Amino acid sequence: MIDSFWDQWNRYFPNLSTFYIYCVATTVLVVFTTYIFTRTTEQKQKDAEIEEVKEFGIQARYKLAKQKVVQQQLTPEQQLEEKRSESESLAEIYKLLRNRRDVFPDATMEDIRDQLSLYKSTE
């Protein structure tokens, strides 16, 4: 069987033109280069995304820690005023959302509080 293959090869290969061999070799090289380049580019993009997430995580932790320190330094009157101001703001936001039921049909006060909790440090 191998002898048969070599016989076929020896008859077929000498009849190939130089241009055809060049085209096949170039195609293989381009496909291989594209594969390598794509993998490298995708890896660089993943690394950049991971670095961005790490950086954002550090910034978020810093801001939450800073917010916690500021909250601890507030007097009881200031804390009460802060909570009152927050409640008023939430009520105004809810009123705006309720007036725009066509855009925000399922908005509830609990949803707004949940959204706010994403931006506040937990005590």
Image: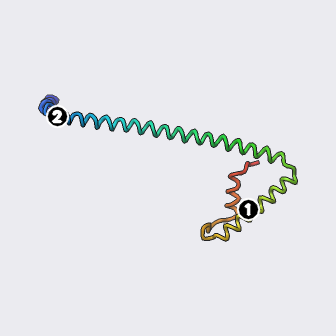
Farthest residue to the front: give it: 19
Q: Position of residue 74 (x, y in %)?
A: 84, 48
Query: Which of labels 1 and 2 is toward the front?
Result: 2
Question: Residue visible at 67% across and 71% down?
Answer: 99
Dot 2 falls on a residue whose secondary structure is: loop
- Is residue 78 left or right of 111 when viewed as pictured? right
In the rendered view, would you say 52 is above or below 87? Answer: above
Residue bearing mark 1: 90
In the rendered view, would you say 110 is above or below 14? Answer: below
Q: What colouring does the structure picture have? A: rainbow
Q: Quadrant of the N terminus?
A: top left
Q: Amino acid at mark 2?
A: Ser
Return the disc, 1 or 2, that comes first in the chain's sequence.
2
Q: Amino acid at mark 1?
A: Leu
Residue bearing mark 2: 17
Report how far apart the C-alphas of labels 1 and 2 lie in the structure. 78 Å
Displayed quadrant of residue 22: top left
In the rendered view, would you say 15 is above or below 114? Answer: above
Label 1 Cα crowd, 10 Å radius (few <14 / some 14-19 / many 20+): some
Q: Position of residue 6 (x, y in %)?
A: 15, 29
Dot 1 falls on a residue whose secondary structure is: helix
Label 2 Cα crowd, 10 Å radius (few <14 / some 14-19 / many 20+): few
The residue closer to the viewer here, 41 or 10, is: 41
